Image (cartoon, rainbow, N blue to C red):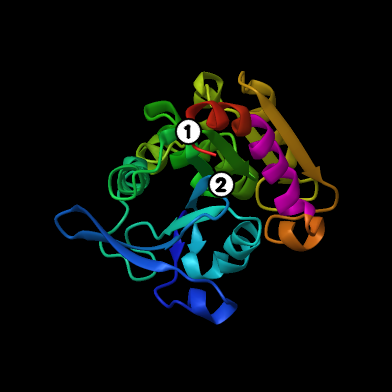
Amino acid sequence: MIFFPDPVLEYEPKDIGLSAETVTLNVSQGVDLYCWYIPASKNRPVLLYLHGNAGNISHRLSIAKGWADRGFGCFMLDYRGYGRSSGQIHHEKDMTDDARAAYGWLRQERGIPAEKIVLYGESIGCAPSIDLALAETAGALVLMAPFTTLPDMARVHYGFRAPGFLVKNFMFDNESKIASVKSPIFLIHGTADEIVPFEMGRKIFERSASTKESYWVEGGTHNDLPQSAGAAFWDRPADFLIRTLGPHLLESGAL
């Protein structure tokens, strides 16, 4: 009812003209994550891309290419059990641990300053993005179609209050956590989202207390935001990131 992983990678970065390094992260015994690292150009930030609950990283390559075309780097990981990653998700903490391993790789193996790492969450990936933003330093947080909590989503799609035993390991309480995030936040959501109601995204935005901007894509649904928004899907958050992070990074000599 929550996760719909696809073990088959339909595309490789080279198929759409991207140069990427294949990275394997050992998170714990029996858990190795399959990832792609696309370096930044122009000394721009790197997005740590945490995808949604279906498919795998190959299905997000077109989004990554849009960012790469604008000079941004992208580190794409498949959670345990997705794509070529081993293991299984048993608790929402597993997703956060996977995200933390990727963040650690960027910091330690590539020496990327924390201020140049942008946490980019898509749908259910917003939950580990928010958790990581609370646990580590990051330049900014970009949220695409975030929901409030998993019990709220259960009421929307199944019409009942989810029993505690069903959601005890997967509360994904983004609504209460977002207020404590100090990183700048950019939130994008389609006004016609049929999976995560637009009002949930608006509520997350209203609850956040940090520097923030939103982009409500008129008529956009859950899975067509790049098509509905066109170039603005990348340009609007990219402009926010450059304006927000630029002065700080210039001071530190990172840009």
CA distance for labels 2 and 1: 11 Å
Quarter holding the C terminus is top right
Q: Is residue 235 magenta?
A: yes
Amino acid identity at mark 2: Arg
Task: Tell which residue pokes out farthest to the right in this image.
Answer: 218
Specify the label residue 6 is tagged with. Answer: none
Reply yes or no: does residue 145 show up in magenta. Answer: no
Residue underneath mark 2: 44
Q: Residue at x 52, y 21 (%)?
A: 182
Kindly state the secondary structure of the residue where label 2 is placed: loop
Is residue 197 visible from the viewing direction of this image?
Answer: no
Q: Nearer the viewer, residue 225 or 153?
A: 225
- Compare marks 2 and 1 and give the one earlier in the sequence: 2
| Residue drawn at (33%, 40%) of the image | 93
- 57 w.r.t. 44: above or below: below
Q: Secondary structure at mark 1?
A: helix
Instruction: State the extent of the magenta-drawn residues as a range.
Output: 232-244
**Residue at which label 1 appears:** 115
Q: Would residue 202 appear left or right of 207 to someone viewing this image?
A: right
Most prominent secondary structure in the magenta stretch?
A: helix
- Of residue 77 and residue 123, the one placed in the foreground of this image is 77
Left or right of 66 in this view: 73: left
Residue pictured at 49% horizontal, 25% vertical: 177
Q: Position of residue 161 (x, y in %)?
A: 54, 36
Q: Residues within 10 Å of mark 2 (few under 14, many from 20)?
A: many
The mark tally for this picture is 2
Would you call the spot at circle 1 few (<14 residues within 10 Å), some (14-19), or many (20 or more)?
some
